[in-house]
Amino acid sequence: MSLRSLVVVSLRIIALKFLLNIFLTVVPQLVLLEHSTQSMPLTNPFSITFIVVLAALITGACMLWSLALPLAQRITRGLPPDISFGALARVDCYTIAFLAIGLWLTAVHFPHVLNWSHYLFRLAATGPTPGEEAISQVNKYEIFSSVLPFIIGILLFLNGRKWSHKLARRDEHIERTEAAKVPELSP
């Protein structure tokens, strides 16, 4: 396995983590913003600034993902190209990363999801009127910040191998096309 492939995988994991943090921070804030503002959100200069910063953060994460290969080439320039991981290929590294992150997110957020599920079921069982009033006062931000990473973790764990194959094929295709573009120097 090449060192460049390992750096590409690492940069893409960082981009995924960055997008996950953006998503987990923004979605609950948008839910709260929807309930707290009475006026149109785009008329407020703070909301426009929020949208611009959000767009810049998402663009930065997407650029890190898409520019992982050129960045890895620049980072590994002048270093030995191969690193010995036995028989691990790029698809194996992607798979390990997706499965590990998915398992970690699922395991860390499972107790919170279980706790919120129990709490909401207990509220619903108390009766129609008191339960509805109590559910309306539940902190939706905390529910989203527990449930969303749990769902993302399950998706990563269940689909990690399939996504790994797609990413590895795409990376290899990009590397082949870039290698075909560069003319070989003859001695």
Image (tube, rainbow, N blue to C red):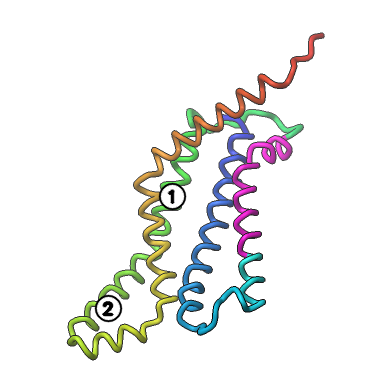
- Numbered tag placed on residue 100 in the rendering: 1
**For residue 143, side relative to residue 11 (left or right):** left
Q: Position of residue 57 (x, y in %)?
A: 63, 60
* Distance (Cα) linking label 2 and label 1: 30 Å
At numbered mark 1, what does the secondary structure look like: helix, strand or loop?
Answer: helix
- Residue positioned most to the top: 187
Tell me the residue at 51%/59% (across/down): 20
- Within the magenta stretch, is there residue 58? yes
Within 10 Å of the Cα at label 1, are there few (<14), some (14-19), or many (20+) other Cα atoms?
A: some
Q: Position of residue 90 (x, y in %)?
A: 51, 33
Point out the frontmost of discs 2 and 1.
Answer: 2
1, above or below 16, in the image = above
At numbered mark 2, what does the secondary structure look like: helix, strand or loop?
Answer: helix
Q: Position of residue 95 (x, y in %)?
A: 44, 40
| Magenta stretch secondary structure, dominant | helix
Q: Give the amino acid type for the residue marked by disc 1 in the picture.
A: Ala
Closest to the observer, 107 or 21: 21
25, above or below 11, in the image = below
